[in-house]
Image (tube, rainbow, N blue to C red):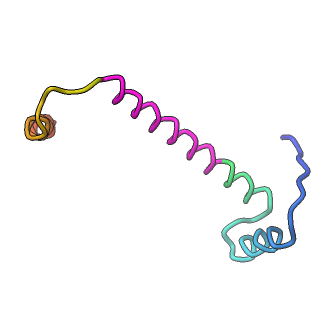
Amino acid sequence: MLRKTITLSEPMEEWIKSQIASGRYASDSEYFRDLIRKDQDKRAAEHQLRAMIQDGLDSGISDKTMLEIKAELHRELLDK
């Protein structure tokens, strides 16, 4: 494990203390590790969403009507 030193404002320190006092976290370190895990999850989800958007853009423009697209999607969902 590595040790890090950070500087916080008084309101931030009070917030962290309140989270620990609520019983949600046992220590400052546990709180920060949870924040980091949540940030990692968020960044991974953003990356996945951006990749999906790019896939959509790369797929080009369809010559199908909206009704045809919906019908195709409906068939795909029924096949699962």
Magenta-colored stretch includes residue 40: yes
Residue located at (14% from left, 34% from top)? 76
Magenta-colored stretch includes residue 55: yes
Using the image as rendered, state which of residue 39 and residue 9 is in the foreground.
9
Using the image as rendered, state which of residue 27 and residue 15 is in the foreground.
15
In which image quadrant can residue 68 be found?
top left
Above or below 17: residue 31: above
**Quadrant in which the N terminus is drawn:** top right
Q: How many marks?
A: 0
Residue located at (36% from left, 28% from top)? 57
Residue located at (14% from left, 36% from top)? 69
Above or below 61: residue 69: below
Residue located at (71% from left, 65% from top)? 25
Predominant secondary structure, magenta span:
helix
The spot of residue 78 in percent (x, y) is: 10, 40
The spot of residue 56 in percent (x, y) is: 34, 30
In which image quadrant can residue 3 be found?
top right
The spot of residue 77 in percent (x, y) is: 15, 39
Above or below 60: residue 76: below
Indicate left or right for 40 with 2 as reference.
left
The spot of residue 12 in percent (x, y) is: 80, 68
Residue bounds of the magenta highlight:
37-59
In which image quadrant can residue 24 be found?
bottom right
